[in-house]
Amino acid sequence: MMVPTYDQFIEPVLRFLATQPEAVRASVVHEAAARALNLTDEQKAAALDSGQPVYRNRTGWAHDRLKRAGLSSSAKRGYWQITPAGAEYLEHQPTPFAAAEVERLASIFKTVESLRPKDSVSLEPAPAVDAAATASVLSPDDRLDQARAELREATARDLHDSLLQVSPTRFEEIVLDVLHQLGYGLNRQDLQRVGGSGDGGIDGVISLDKLGLEKVYVQAKRWQNSVGRPELQAFYGALAGQKAKRGIFMTTSGFTAQGVDFARQVEGMVLIDGARLVNLMMDCEVGVSSKVLKIPKIDTDYFDEE
């Protein structure tokens, strides 16, 4: 017997979370959903090629969709929790959910750009993702591209959650790891964290040459509110105090329009918001790993006869 599709896990996951006064381990939710769906031992034993049980994978995707709908959250790493909006939602939902409602929740697709504060602006255009297109109108290659885009966005949102949960010190270290993977500094030791009291708005410094004559200064803000013009002016003042020509301001949130305008008016200041940061982390494989998917394709040259 096949394991139920991930959309069928959505209601069991949300209703179980509603019974928990505090955040609960994801592993506990996996088992609760399996019980609610009356999964057999055979169904629970089914595994993906990676070795992960299928029912746990699908429980995770159900939670991902609930998070996108704002009905649940990852309170901390490995813990899930219903949100106030999720509790209110259940008050108006009979059991079981209507099929159309399950389909609506399952099809919700929000990019990491949606995590930016409302008063911030996008620094670069987000790639278009047609999540509404149905499998019947997509070629296999199109479905692969769509699946890759959804997997990337899910990972981006998980990365963003993780960044908000680490300490400010750890966030500064992560930012320097990303910059090193992007090619800044001859080695990791050329990127030093200097944050702390009296840091003057500087959290890290990068030496671009062996003698340390050319430096880039970094400020890393693990914020949820937008970074505005005052914060960027203060950073620019700190750069001037160091007689620095280049500065990078990274944040988990976003930048206001006034802040972006200021950064464009001065020389040598680069802004990286939360959406761009998590995409850089995925591209550089900082805090993430990738797997290779082997897709067979016929080699027509092999069959040519001369």
Image: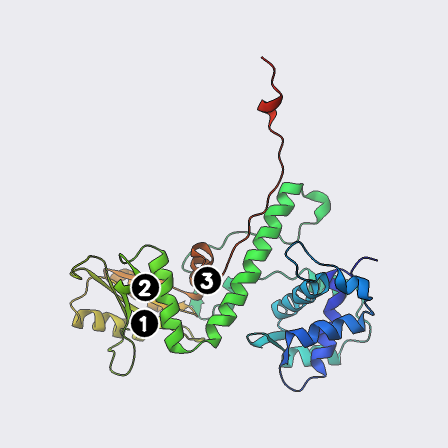
Q: Position of residue 119 (x, y in %)?
A: 44, 71
Q: Which one is in front, 210 or 246?
A: 210
Q: Looking at the picture, does residue 116 appear above or below residue 150?
A: below
> Secondary structure beneath disc 2?
helix
User: Hey, what amino acid is under mark 1?
Assistant: Arg
Question: Looking at the rendering, in which quadrant would you find the C terminus?
Answer: top right
Q: Can you tell which mark lies on residue 229? A: 1
Q: Looking at the picture, does residue 185 appear above or below residue 35?
A: above
Q: Can you tell which mark lies on residue 237? A: none
Q: Nearer the viewer, mark 1 or mark 3?
A: 3
Q: Which residue is mark 2?
A: 261
Quarter where residue 56 is shown = bottom right
Q: Position of residue 7 (x, y in %)?
A: 73, 63
Q: How is the image coloured?
A: rainbow
Question: Looking at the rendering, in which quadrant would you find the N terminus?
Answer: bottom right
Q: Which one is in front, 200 or 269?
A: 200
User: Hey, what amino acid is under mark 3?
Assistant: Val
Q: CA distance from mark 2 to mark 1?
A: 8 Å
Residue at 71% x, 58% y is 47
Q: CA distance from mark 2 to mark 3?
A: 23 Å
Q: Residue furthest bottom?
A: 21
Q: Can you tell which mark lies on residue 278? A: 3
Residue density around tag 3, few if under 14, some if 14–19, many if 20 or more, within 10 Å: many
Query: Counting residues from the N terminus, which is met first, the one under dot 2 or under dot 3?
Result: 2
User: Hey, what amino acid is under mark 2?
Assistant: Asp
Q: Residue furthest top?
A: 306
> Secondary structure beneath disc 1?
helix
